[in-house]
Amino acid sequence: MFSKTEKTSQENAEDILYGVNLAVDSDQLTDLEKKHLPIITAPESVRKGECFEVTIEAGKLLRHPNELEHHIEFVELYADSTYLARMDFAAGTSYPMTKLWVSLNRAHRKLRALSHCNLHGTWEADVEIEVKD
Ligand SMILES: [Fe+2]
């Protein structure tokens, strides 16, 4: 569900506002990771050109604050490194969850999502997807 990384928890804490944060151990997520990692719900397998639904939700595992001083500003979706979509959120009035319709016209291996918190930086998670002919 989440990409493994070589970063330690200490390095993750020091680097939180720089670069992209990944789950250090997907079997033992920290509360910070649970609040920020974008959770992707999508089919495991699709056909080329087929429209399918993708849901991205930040704070699904542990609710993230949604106040002007602290909120999720946006989520983005990629197929591998190909940009697909972005949704911006207004603090306090929109919830950091979005549903998208996606159609992939060539093979990709992963759907990747980024979520961005105004205080805690950018977080990434992914799911594998098979695109069949
Ligand atoms: Fe945050």
Image (tube, helix red, strand yellow):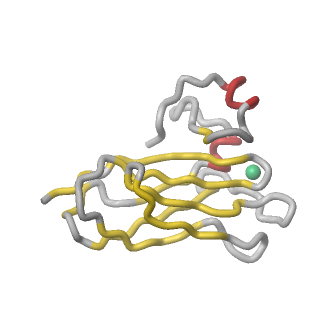
State the quadrant of the N terminus.
top left
- Which picture quadrant has residue 42? bottom left
Q: Residue furthest right?
A: 69
Q: What residue do we see at 77% from left, 55% from top?
A: 118
Residue 105, position in %: x, y? 24, 64
Number of dots carrying numbers: 0
Q: What residue do we see at 58% from left, 69% from top?
A: 87
State the quadrant of the C terminus.
bottom left
116 relative position to 93: left or right: left
Q: Residue furthest left?
A: 133
Q: Is residue 105 above or below residue 123?
A: below
91 relative position to 113: left or right: right
Q: Residue furthest front?
A: 82
Q: What residue do we see at 41% from left, 65% from top?
A: 54
Q: Is residue 15 above or below residue 52?
A: above
- Which picture quadrant has residue 115? bottom right
113 relative position to 70: left or right: left
Q: Is residue 128 above or below residue 86?
A: above
Residue 38, position in %: x, y? 56, 53
Q: Is residue 87 above or below residue 129?
A: below
